[in-house]
Image (spheres, grey):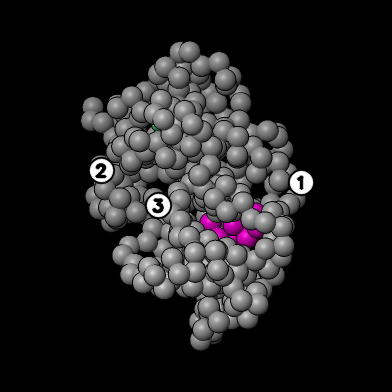
Amino acid sequence: MKIKAALVYEKGQPFVIEELELDEPKEGEILVKVVACGVCHTDEGAQFQAIPVPLPAVLGHEGAGIVEKIGPGVTEFKVGDRVGFSFSSCGKCEECLDGHPYACKDFNTINFGGIMPDGTTRLHKDGKDIATFFGQGAFATHAVVHTRQAVKVPYDDIDLGVVAPFGCGIQTGAGAVFHTLNPKFDSSIAVFGCGTVGMSAIMAARIAGCKNIIAVGGNPKSLKLALELGATHTINRKECDDIVAEIKEITKGGCHYAIDTSGVSDFVKKALACVRFKGTAVVLGLTGDLTINVQEELMGEAKSLVGVVEGDANSKTFIPKLLEYYHEGKFPVDRLIKFYDFKDINTAFEESHQGVAIKSVLKMQ
Ligand SMILES: [Zn+2]
Ligand SMILES: [Zn+2]
């Protein structure tokens, strides 16, 4: 069928919306009319080729929409179901079978290799294959996705525009808290970075019962929102000379947990430094080289430094749980979102950079 999709033709080029051909869903796949798709830094990673996705490609990996057609063998979904998309996985390797699809042995190939799990693509233009992203390519009016990465929305009254970002940034931040840290009641946590991932971690830490939740960021407007979403303290990194000392002061010796969402090596170091003896620091940002003195900064104080992607989440079970919290008003992610028309996709990316919106979400139809 003919669809409209946002294409990136060459490294660093803006998105152009054009007509493409989308194949029918194959075995285990569904065709979804995309209603909304979140805009994420990872899309830019592909656009600027820090993640070498083959180009031209249709990016977009936080889609949500309505099932329009089911492929052969699909029993889990029916036409009309409201679904959100998450990352792709093979469903067969040890980690997938063990309930940790984010650690799938084929994760990079099927999420960043431009292909579906069966090694082919559903997108074409002028007879040529077009790469997909995260098995979705959801910057489009329609997408074919595998049922493994589709999640049924448990409520009819949740805007699919709010559902969209649960598939990546939101589950990454919340999952790091609930799965990787599983914080103890009355504990303290510091969160570096107040974007979607950081804010989701802050909201999750409040649900988990953390006593001190310290948001570290550089934008006063975001820090104010962090307080409303659950942070008990904020530190403006631009105004604070010694962030680690400030956190140690607030927590009387250091927090139990810290999460870095910035991907800046210096903040990862600070996250590790601000946790107390036996504390854990989690890395969620795309961080490059980092030098630490293992004896002094890690082993000597029995600390852990852990990396995790997609919040170690099994989206099928985790996203519905988070949507329940959202529905109950305990996880108000809508406070982060600004909507844009699909045609304004380049503006949506620009404005996320300028901090106009914490989470930009495109509405397709
Ligand atoms: Zn797998
Ligand atoms: Zn993402």
Mark 2 burial class by Cα count in 10 Å: few <14, some 14-19, many 20+: many
Q: In this orientation, which residue lies closer to the viewer: 251 or 156?
A: 251
Mark 1 burial class by Cα count in 10 Å: few <14, some 14-19, many 20+: few
Q: Position of residue 1 (x, y in %)?
A: 39, 24
Mark 3 burial class by Cα count in 10 Å: few <14, some 14-19, many 20+: some
Q: Image height check: is 83 above or below 211?
A: above
Q: Position of residue 250 (x, y in %)?
A: 65, 77
Q: Which residue is mark 3?
A: 42
Q: In this orientation, which residue lies closer to the viewer: 294 or 79?
A: 294
Disc on the earlier residue, 3 or 2: 3
Q: Residue furthest right?
A: 328
Q: Position of residue 194 (x, y in %)?
A: 55, 65
Distance from the alpha carbon under mark 3 to that under mark 2: 15 Å
Quadrant housing residue 337: bottom right
Judge: label 2 CB < 8 Å from ligand 2. Answer: no
Q: Which residues are magenta?
A: 197-206
Q: Which residue is mark 1?
A: 328
Q: How many marks?
A: 3
Amino acid type, residue under disc 1 in the picture: Glu
Q: Is residue 11 visible?
A: yes
Amino acid type, residue under disc 2 in the picture: Leu
Secondary structure beneath dot 2 equals loop
Lateral position of residue 232 relative to residue 306, left or right: right
Tags 3 and 1 in contact by the CB under 8 Å rule?
Answer: no
Distance from the alpha carbon under mark 1 to that under mark 2: 42 Å
Tags 1 and 2 in contact by the CB under 8 Å rule?
Answer: no
Secondary structure beneath dot 1 equals loop
